[in-house]
């Protein structure tokens, strides 16, 4: 059954030339053998992508394909003899398509970049903190898995620490060039040397511990200082503690991602802290003062006369510290007025007197004066 080249590239049948080119670029990068070493499935997919592009990027071939289901006319099929013979793709070799688009042609610039010094990969660890940890800052010991120099060969990759020598195949450049004549002209491609795999050096006998890579995966314990003011989703960068670089490149970084545990009393909005304060109706009406347990110690909270349910009391500078210094946010106290579900006879009498006083006409004492007298 003939392949659907539009489906291979993931584009509609009416796709423009630019849409086809963009789809090819994206898929070629994803499935290129250099990006998927040893993956036969990716290699076959890459060839299929190149075959589809060689047809759909050519106006005449695409027209024949749309009309007959084949780029070479009725009955020819895609395995038959096309204008390049033997079913060859017009770039000569499928890798040349990638190099023609991504810098491998001419002087082999793309391959040179791949075989030069490479920065190590960044690493990530997650840490769970309490709100108090985020407020004060904390030092934690974290276990990190990463590649390090092999202890058996001291990072040389050679048995018993044998030093590597210059690769005789590529002369130490880490790449080999190959010229190909195609229908689009002569292409010179540069690829990682298959002998030294782009390193530019080889060893006579590989280290049996690391198999010549010069690196081993090890677990290390690092002490990490997390500053005050961090919050959920924050990340702390520890420079140079990621994977080591390759071919003399710098190491990557370690990123510590913070997950903040929910607190049983406080909720947080950036540097603001929010907390509920439950008071009775008499206290809301008459006003009172409370001792509130703050994030960093006791706080005096004054509830004014006539405080309404849900009213907010903002205490400046009693919230979370700013991550980059310069003071703290606010603590917002939400007043919750509690209404008793059961009343004693004395309480009921007092409330009835208060109700009667509130229903009364004009009174020079005012409402709160009547409340005070009722409770007396």
Image: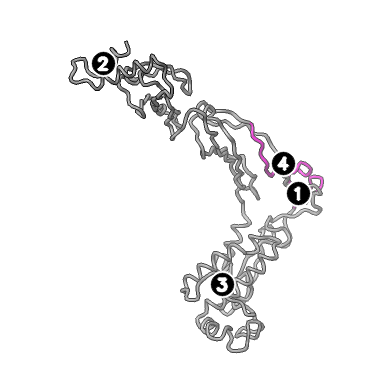
Q: Is residue 7 above or below residue 328?
A: below
Front tag of 4 and 3:
3
Residue 162: within the magenta? yes
User: Residue at the spot x=79%, y=45% of the render?
Assistant: 161
Q: Is residue 112 above or below residue 316?
A: below
In this image, 311 relative to 137: left or right?
Answer: left
Q: Residue 218's mark?
A: 4
> Upstream in the sequence, badge 3 or badge 1?
3
How is this picture coloured?
one colour
Q: Which residue corresponds to mark 1?
A: 157
Report which quarter residue 280 is drawn in: top left
Are the residues at dot 3 and dot 1 in contact (C-beta closer than 8 Å)? Answer: no
Q: Which residue corresponds to mark 2?
A: 370
> Upstream in the sequence, badge 1 or badge 4?
1
Front-most of residues 187 and 350: 350
> Upstream in the sequence, badge 1 or badge 2?
1
Q: Secondary structure at mark 2?
A: helix
Q: Residue 3's mark?
A: none
Are the residues at dot 1 and dot 2 in contact (C-beta closer than 8 Å)? Answer: no
Disc 1 versus disc 2: distance between alpha carbons? 91 Å
Residue 175: within the magenta? no
Disc 4 versus disc 3: distance between alpha carbons? 44 Å
Disc 3 versus disc 2: distance between alpha carbons? 83 Å
Report which quarter residue 168 is drawn in: bottom right
Front tag of 3 and 2:
2
């Amino acid at each position: 059954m003939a392949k659907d080249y539009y489906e291979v590239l993931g584009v509609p049948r009416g796709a423009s030339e630019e849409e086809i080119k963009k789809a090819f670029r994206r898929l070629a990068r994803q499935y290129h053998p250099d990006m998927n070493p040893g993956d036969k499935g990716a290699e076959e997919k890459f060839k299929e992508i190149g075959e589809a592009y060689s047809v759909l990027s050519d106006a005449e071939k695409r027209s024949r394909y749309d009309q007959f289901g084949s780029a070479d006319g009725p009955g020819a099929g895609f395995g038959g003899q096309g204008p390049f013979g033997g079913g060859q793709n017009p770039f000569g070799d499928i890798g040349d398509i990638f190099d023609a688009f991504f810098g491998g042609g001419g002087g082999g610039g793309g391959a040179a970049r791949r075989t030069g010094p490479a920065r190590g990969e960044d690493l990530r660890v997650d840490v769970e903190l309490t709100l108090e940890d985020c407020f004060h800052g904390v030092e934690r010991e974290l276990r990190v898995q990463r590649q390090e120099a092999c202890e058996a060969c001291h990072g040389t990759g050679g048995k018993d620490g044998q030093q590597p020598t210059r690769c005789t195949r590529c002369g130490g450049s880490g790449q080999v060039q190959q010229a190909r004549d195609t229908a689009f002209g002569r292409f010179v491609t540069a690829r990682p040397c298959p002998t030294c795999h782009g390193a530019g050096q080889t060893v006579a006998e590989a280290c049996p511990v690391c198999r010549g890579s010069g690196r081993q995966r090890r677990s290390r314990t690092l002490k990490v200082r997390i500053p005050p003011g961090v919050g959920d989703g924050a990340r702390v960068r520890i420079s140079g503690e990621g994977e080591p670089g390759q071919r003399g490149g710098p190491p990557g970084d370690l990123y510590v991602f913070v997950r903040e545990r929910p607190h049983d009393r406080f909720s947080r909005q950036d540097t603001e802290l929010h907390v509920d304060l439950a008071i009775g109706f008499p206290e809301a009406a008459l006003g009172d003062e409370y001792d509130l347990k703050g994030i960093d110690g006791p706080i005096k909270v004054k509830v004014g006369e006539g405080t309404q349910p849900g009213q907010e009391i903002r205490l400046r500078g009693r919230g979370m510290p700013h991550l980059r210094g310069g003071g703290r946010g606010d603590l917002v106290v939400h007043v919750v007025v509690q209404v008793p579900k059961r009343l004693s006879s004395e309480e009921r009498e007092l409330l009835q007197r208060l109700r009667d006083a509130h229903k009364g006409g004009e009174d020079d004492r005012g409402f709160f004066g009547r409340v005070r007298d009722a409770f007396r």
